[in-house]
Image (spheres, rainbow, N blue to C red):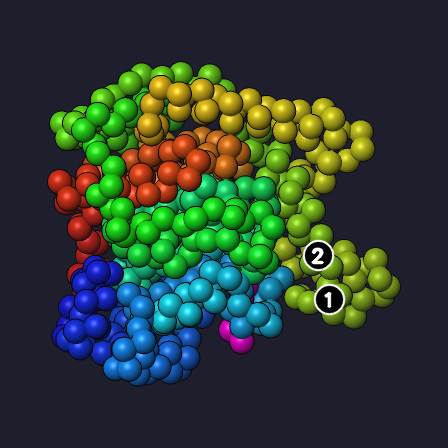
Amino acid sequence: MTDLHRLSIRELSEGLAGAKFSSRELTEHYLKRIAKLDTQVKSYVTVTAEQALAQADAADAAIKAGTATALTGVPIAHKDIFCTQGIKTTAGSKMLDNFISPYDATVVAKGKAAGLVTLGKVNMDEFAMGSTSENSFYGATANPWNLGHVPGGSSGGSAAAVAADLAPFATGTDTGGSIRQPASFCGLTGLKPSYGRVSRFGMIAYASSLDQGGPMARSAEDCAYLMNVMAGHDAKDSTSVEKDVDDYVANLNGTAIQGLRIGIPKQYFNVAGLDADVKARVEESLKKLEEMGATLVEIDLNMTEAYVPTYYLIAPAEASSNLSRYDGVRYGYRAENPVDLMDLYKRSRSEGFGAEVQRRILIGTYALSAGYYDAYYVKAQKVRRLIQQDFLKAFESVDVIAAPAAPTTAYKIGANLSPVEMYLGDIYTIAVNLAGLPAINAPVGFDKDNLPVGLQLIGNYWSESQLLSVVHQYQQATDWHTKRAAIAEENA
Ligand code: GLN
């Protein structure tokens, strides 16, 4: 079979269960594609071919023995932020270029227990700081829709791998948009769950009160399969919730579009820098949902202007604290021939961290320093609460809130935006993390350069099933999620 990479997760699951093909065949098929096509996409940092084939054989045995789950034998790519026992975990940083974790992240362990086959680890902005994946020690990843453009970030490797059919689906993490924005830039579906829905254990920390893992795939249905594996309480993560997990696949048609109230924040569609094509495609998708029975309700989100400054104080503040562990002593990069301990710390951190990470450590350390703590950090926390209240008030009158995932389509590689320009691109995604809400991106068409545009739907707490269901039904009625980039059409 030459077209195994065109099958949905459900089709893969059924094909494996029905012995139409084996996990070994499927895994070899993907490894062949990676070997041929990833020289152009550069989505993988590490390909784990040998281990993948061993896992595939074990999966085939489990299928024969009747002990398989729905996903046994299905390949996956993990963002290189999830710790993998015995396999390098770099977080896109020179600091961790030699790091092999002694344990698996809970998300990885759950994937293994479900019989998923790990193809490898995919590229990302260093420590998940960025929106292009260019901040990786391992170099830029290309957008499969146009190899001269970025796939977005920080989960750019995950998005590019799936969009080029170099993995059927992938894990990502989202601290301020890192699942939704690359999904948008690459024409994929990506879900950022409510804070606490997915375990952060073994997920290398960027900003702990914002970080959340989630699925990236072609469709809401594919995401639902992966959510069924990823979601759930974990005793090893004290911020994970002890709340029953939905069956996201079974609930795919569980939310009625008829009568669904979709909030359209006035402020979001007046943002300077909102690209005309992005605006048009998002509005067309909302029109479609309206035709399907939804009601569009104009709402106010008055705190919109505060999103970027608030996020860019809190996220770097937490990052500066989290990243203090990389000191050149315990693990990770260590500078050569230090003259004393201070020199070891200084040079290990200066040489091991890239420019954007250093910038954030400086901003965060400044915001947390004794003289500025109240003026910056405490104030940002208060504004954060107001942002959350703004959303909660909106959810009194609407079921979901619609927004673009990003104001533009994918940037050119090397566009070299200033940090502030870059940060402004996060306007539509970061408030969701500040509030801890779930949100999903769905592909809804293309701009004039044939680059994908995404619609973001934000839900109330624990409404992952609802978001997946709304997007699933939209995808049953449209075909944007089935469009493939030229490189994905190539055979290996
Ligand atoms: N682009 C945002 C940042 O650089 C979000 C990144 C993320 O979600 N990890 O912080």
In this view, 14 is above or below 65: above
What's the magenta region? 86-90
The percent coordinates of residue 41 (x first, y second) are 33, 61
Discs 2, 1 touching: Cβ within 8 Å: yes
User: Residue at point 58% right, 57% down?
Assistant: 235
Please, what is the three-letter code of the amino acid marked with disc 1?
Arg
Question: Which of these two is toward me, 219 or 99?
Answer: 219
Question: Is residue 390 rendered magenta in the image?
Answer: no
In the image: residue 267, left or right of residue 280: right
- Distance between the alpha carbons at the discs numbered 2 and 1: 8 Å
| Residue under pointer 2 | 325
Q: What mark, if any, has residue 330 been given in the picture? A: 1
Is residue 256 among the parts visible in the rendering? yes
For the C terminus, the quadrant is bottom left
Determine crowd level at label 1: few under 14, some 14-19, many 20+ residues with C-alpha closer than 10 A. few
Please, what is the three-letter code of the amino acid marked with disc 2?
Arg
Does dot 1 land on a helix, a strand or a loop? loop
The percent coordinates of residue 103 (x first, y second) are 57, 70
Question: Which of these two is toward me, 1 or 262?
Answer: 262
Is residue 443 among the parts visible in the rendering? no
In this view, 349 is above or below 267: below
In this view, 249 is above or below 269: below
